[in-house]
Amino acid sequence: MKVALFVTCLGDTLFPEAAQATVHVLERLGHEVVFPEEQTCCGQMHLNSGYRDEAAVLAKRFLDVFADCDVVVSPSSSCVGTVRELYPELVGSTHPEVYELSELLVRKLNVTDVGATFPHKVTYHPTCHSLRVTRVGDAPLELLRNVHGLELVELPRADECCGFGGTFSVKNAETSTAMLADKCASVVASGAEVCTAVDGSCLMQIGGGLSRNHAGVRTLHLAEILAAT
Amino acid sequence: MSGFPDAARLELVNPQLRSNLRNATDTIREKRARVVGELPDWEELREAGRGIKADVLARLDEYLEQFESAAQAAGAHVHWARDAAEANAIVVDVARRHGVTEVVKMKSLTTDEIHLNDALSAAGIFALETDFAELILQLDGDWPSHILVPAIHRNRTEIRDLFARTIATGPLTDDPHDLAEAARVYLREKFLDAKMGVSGANFGVAETGTVCIVESEGNGRMCTTLPPVLVSVLGIEKLVPTFADLEVFLQLLPRSSTGERMNPYTSLWTGVTPGDGPDEMHIVLLDAGRTRVLADEVGRVALHCIRCSACLNVCPVYTRTGGHAYGSVYPGPIGAILTPQLIGVENAPTLPYASTLCGACYEVCPVKIDIPGVLLHLRAKVVETEGRSAERATMRIAGRIFRSRRTFELGQRLARIGFPLARRLPGPLAAWTKTRDLKPVPRQSFRTWWRQR
């Protein structure tokens, strides 16, 4: 299948590893990945901060850039959620097939074993958007359970927000940090070596907290684990 | 009203508050999940609740007049109040006409919202709070921090000390039974002497003119049945069309609120009945900003709220900051969308941003209020009303950068040069690096890698 990659502005600039891993996983499974180079940002930051006009411009731009692509995949569930769930209200239409990576693999391509090997103890943080907006459900867990050598350990209070929330992390930095402290404590309590998720921004928050506390736990995007052999 | 971030900062430094909140909200959350989980038709019930509320709001004018006629026919006096001042004046007037200097009150957010106690006090009338938690707060000059559990931020040792100082007639332990008994002894006399009761309402039935309250302690039943005069203040959004509609809400509310299948006391009263309950009954229908909320087609779903507080208990922000940070009697996610609409977003511009948009509130709301959706809507209104700001300028620039591939790629290069180490970000972004590390911007963006592979 030909799949267009929506890398996201943050992913392109700050976490290229997750997008590269997405390309590797899909190509390994025999799919063709294309990258429309005109893409920039879906408008999520503007929309979530109250700048609807700017967001609408970026939404229309996104729909133009991906107009010729049948299937779009992204390693960010919150950007997928914006395109799929919020564009209809914002600009009156959306792209018919935009998927977060784990959704594409499990629901659309019916793959749960991507042939990955990752012999580490891993815990999965279900990000709020993947859980309640994009609703990827257990897809990431199904994929993780089929990674060879991987030991999946439960994250206490998994469904609680990490405190990122885009500009919330700066506007309400103290509250964000209090939420993050609890999330980091849960990650450490899980006994995992690696904490994974399907949103780079939440991993940036959790990783930033773990690193500051010298917790000895790394963060990796789900795609990076799935790409590991 | 001071902004949410500043108010939250004051609360966050109190570890006792956070652990009190965490323990209390965890307990209620678990109870709620259990009793909601045992109903196979929970989703249908939520949809029914949402549907009834949407219908009420769409035809509120008709339902209000129907309610007024039915209540009057049953012998109640119905008053209309445009704002807090009018509502308070009505209650004060009733009290004065009966020469009352003390009224007994049941827990009521609506009367807290309009600061009725202060208005009564200014008229020389003392309003005694008879709900256990409200009594605690009143005795200590404190104010509610949770819709259901107003004194959630206080622990029992603090309460023992307070009672010992104020109402206790003898030595007191911090055993909950002892504390409740002390309050009971104090309140019983007051109930028996009271000449006037004041209540809010959970529901008003348009068809019959009936007022309904649900509660746990029975103090509300005392307030509404013992004194000869009763005044009930209802927000105009509290109506349901028919008596049968209560069936839906009396299932949704206790399960969402206290995590009980049924609340201990459900009181319903319709006008006056000779020899049974009050001889004189007044109903104050309160607008106080509600019609303004109603005029907003997106924001009006906030008026669906039945004040269960489930959204507070699951909110990761509320459970860290507590209710006082929201600066209103309506804290938590529902407060973040209701308060700015009731008083105008320009008067509470930080509240719509007091959320990570995690969506936990929407998931548990018994009447399916899309709180994240309304937050986004209100954020757009804040931006509209604020005009020029540094943030707006930054967002404009960011918007420009994202509008073309060329400027975006230029922006990426500048980010790489500007923040090679990212130990401390500039401007407002410094708040990020104060508590969190940031990986340096990678030397190669994804698109560069893509081109070179």
Image (cartoon, coloured by chain):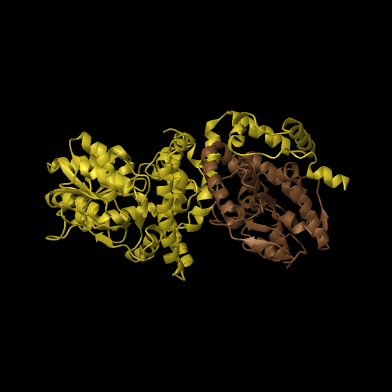
Chain colours: A brown, B yellow
In the image, residue B58 lies at what x, y percent?
Answer: 43, 54
Q: Quadrant of residue B377?
A: top right
Left or right: B169 as drawn, with respect to B35? left
In the image, residue B278 lies at what x, y percent?
Answer: 16, 55
Left or right: B316 as drawn, with respect to B159? right
Q: Is residue B338 above or below residue B382?
A: below
Residue nearer the viewer, B274 or A226: A226
Q: Quadrant of residue B340?
A: top left
Residue nearer the viewer, B111 or A221: A221
Residue nearer the viewer, B335 or B276: B335
Residue B384 visible in the current orientation = yes
Residue nearer the viewer, B317 or B102: B317
> Which quadrant: the N terminus of chain B?
top left
Identified at 76% across, 40% down, the residue is B442
Can you name the residue that lies furthest to the bottom here? B40
In the image, residue B28 lies at what x, y percent?
Answer: 40, 57
In the image, residue A202 lies at what x, y percent?
Answer: 63, 48
Total marks drawn?
0
Residue A161 visible in the current orientation = no
Left or right: B425 as drawn, with respect to A22? left
